[in-house]
Amino acid sequence: MIVRRTVQLFFLILGGVLGYHLIPPLFKILNPWLNLGDLMYQEYIGAAIGALIFLAAVVWLSDSFVQAFKWVEDRIIRIHVSDLLFGTLGLILGLIIAFLLFLPLQQIPYVNTFLPVFISVLLGYLGFQVGYKKKDEILTFLSMPKGKDKGEGKERQTELKLLDTSVIIDGRIADICHTGFLEGTLVIPQFVLEELQHIADSSDVLKRNRGRRGLDILNRIQKEKNVKVIIYEQDFEEIQEVDSKLVKLAKVLSGKVLTNDFNLNKVCELQGIPVLNINDLANAVKPIVLPGEELTVQVIKDGKEHGQGVAYLDDGTMIVVEGGKDFIGEHVDVMVTSVLQTSAGRMVFAKPKLLEKAL
């Protein structure tokens, strides 16, 4: 209601001012045909006519004006205050540059009236867009120490490790943090936290349990004294996919992505972003088993080939026991015959020592 009244009052005053200056000359032009004679108070009559015309027009168009104003207001409210601040600073800088260009443009005939207005609008818009979209990069550049400390600043920036949703749900990151092997600052983006909460609110029981476990893992990580955890609230609204947002944020912060997602790992490698993959770490710390070593394992199921049995080490390494089908459910001593490294991990082939002695 206040907006509507304010718009109507503004156009009422505008119509009066325009009518005061423009309608009296119009009376003089139309006087020979209308025979108005020596009309008194032409300026005030013109102001009244102009005010009435503009008031009638704005009453007819007031709903459109109010809707447009509300739309602009909603858009401004949704913008983060930091984005609005940097966008405004960019707008001011663009207008300053446009003002500096006015002096040489005024010397150009024919175009010196409209060209400055066009350049002001263009540079103001470009300045706002640059300030709005490059805010994070500007902050990162300004936060980097000067002179000799610049290398140290870069090193400090690369200590940031961004967690994605999969590595949080996986849960092993909490144990790694507890051991103290992971240094630096863990960054949990707000959009990752929102995705995790969305999963925890899913109607699917499995997804809901995974999401809740991820939230529990975050609580464990935040309680660890060995690592520092921060929630990064900046979002990239122009990007839809969470993984794409994570890649963009890693570029802005010059950080590393901590994940166990194979596809995200490949995308980061293609774009030159350092990746810490939990699965690679798990495979790297598995104990090395060499042919000829003796192990004690429990055969738990059949293998793919005839007569084979399958067992597992404590770290999850699969052991294929030749002739182990007869020992399902039993602990048996085996001797390693070969080791095969696959993309899924390490696979060990072995034979029971009883069969070895029989041979």
Image (cartoon, rainbow, N blue to C red):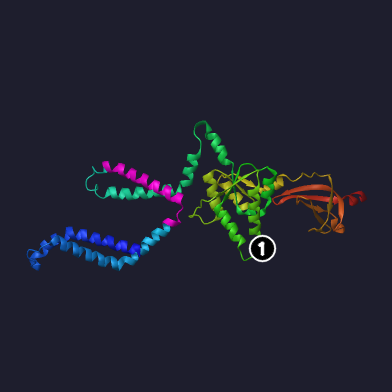
Q: Main secondary structure of the magenta part?
A: helix
Q: Is residue 352 magenta?
A: no
In which quadrant is the N terminus drawn? Answer: bottom left
Residue 53 in percent (x, y) is at: 22, 66
Residue in the image at 45% along x and 54% along y: 79
Q: Amino acid at mark 1?
A: Leu
For mark 1, what is the residue?
Answer: 206
Residue in the image at 34% along x and 63% along y: 2
Q: Furthest-top residue in view? A: 148
Relative to the observer, which residue lies in front, 222 or 157?
Answer: 222
Relative to the observer, which residue lies in front, 54 or 281?
Answer: 54
Q: Which residues are magenta?
A: 76-103
Relative to the observer, which residue lies in front, 84 or 165?
Answer: 84
Q: Is residue 226 left or right of residue 192?
A: right
Q: Furthest-front residue in view? A: 2
Eyeballing the image, is 63 above or below 164? below
Residue in the image at 63% along x and 54% along y: 166
| Picture quadrant where residue 161 is located | top right
